[in-house]
Amino acid sequence: MKALRNYIDKIKPNFQEGGKLHAFHSVFDGIETFLFVPNETSKTGVHIHDSIDSKRTMSVVLLALMPALLFGMYNVGYQHYLSIGELASTDFLTIFLYGLLAVLPKIVVSYGVGLGIEFVIAQWKKHEIQEGFLVSGMLIPMIVPVDTPLWMIAIATAFAVVFAKEIFGGTGMNIFNVALITRAFLFFAYPGKMSGDSVWVRTEDTFGMGSGQVVDGFTGATPLGQIATAPNTEAVVTDIVGNSISTMDYFIGLIPGSIGETSTLAILIGAVILMLSGIGSWKTIVSTFIGGFAITSLFNLFPSTAGLALSPIDQICLGGFAFGAVFMATDPVTSARTETGKYIYGFLVGAIAMLVRVVNPGYPEGMMLAILLMNVFAPLIDHYVVESNISRRLKRSKVTNA
């Protein structure tokens, strides 16, 4: 590391004012501060510093995302080879490599477009590069169907970075979760590529791997899609080739769905990393699950449809609920910031997500809309929590003085 530090110091003058590469100062600064924690000291204001800056924070979130991402890559390959009837004869490495090659271009496009825009804006404003997109760039490919075209991801990412982030002032100033705005843009602009039964399972080859005729009886419907269209309260949920699947299958995640959202087990591993590191609020995560569990338990009392009759555990394991609760609802910029507010915010996110999912059969998912809606109300929740604290302390003060 010392050799790398010496090399960075050696080339640094080229990127400073008057240097021949000054035009790329923001890019150099972003790379330097990512590799090494800045050692500058404040001249005025607060003088308390911590080695865990925003870049280190984002790195921990990326680490927490890895279990869901790696499982998602495997699941992409698993669903493909299952769909063409070659799963039993295909080894683990081939399945994973297929998924890796299918997902990697989406990650490259997401980071290339998003960071490219941020580099340009930072250089234009002569500001340092903001690191918030380190996480958003990974979240975006994880919350879309595997067959989403790359050009759509590029357009949606550009829209989200410019109109949901930079227009508000950049990282820390946005009121909506950037990754979810990307998905919302895709959902409303290109609904045919974000819903239905044909977008969740990749049946074509990937860089020459895979491909073949799908087996008889193949359907790419997700479990939530099957439940939403069930003719009665007893929905028979099957995998893409017609085999019955259970709650354990939902929990493990070998089912059709968005790339990083299918495995509740992998997501919970990430949740443990976030909570132990203190990066993700356990209050928000736990209250979101409680909110979802509570509202679905209430729905179970009136089981007039398959969605209303589905058990709370199954509801929580399906769709993007767990992923949203762990990685989206906990966004420190767009969620509630007061400690009491985190409980309220999380509970309402979970409850509204299930309400949208069950009551509206045309949209068998609800986490995206629930979080974006609560992003709007997060400041209001914090405001009333603070006002309540002030009022309570004033009353206590009057009693003491009396």
Image: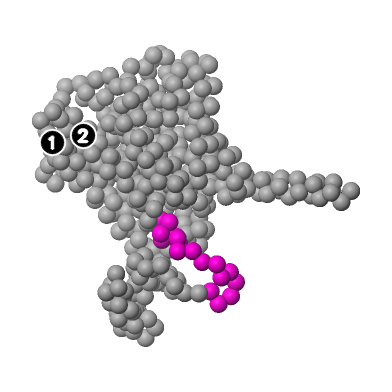
Colour scheme: one colour
Q: Give coordinates of residue 372: x percent, y percent.
A: 50, 43
Looking at the image, is 78 positioned above or below residue 155?
A: above
- Most common secondary structure along the magenta stretch: loop
Residue 229 lies left or right of residue 102; in this view the side is: right
From which residue to which does the magenta span run?
42-58
First along the sequence among labels 2 and 1: 2
Q: Give coordinates of residue 169: x percent, y percent.
A: 50, 62
Residue 214 lies left or right of residue 243; in this view the side is: left
- Crowding around mark 2 (Cα neighbors within 10 Å: few <14, some 14 to 19, many 20+) is many
- Residue at the image point whose x is 39% and y is 38% from the top: 268
Give the residue at mark 2: 78
Q: Residue furthest bottom?
A: 18
Residue type, numbered disc 2 = Tyr
In this rendering, does residue 257 appear at all? yes
Label 2 secondary element: helix
- Crowding around mark 1 (Cα neighbors within 10 Å: few <14, some 14 to 19, many 20+) is few
**Spatial separation of the CA atoms under disc 2 and disc 1:** 10 Å
Q: Quadrant of residue 231?
A: top left
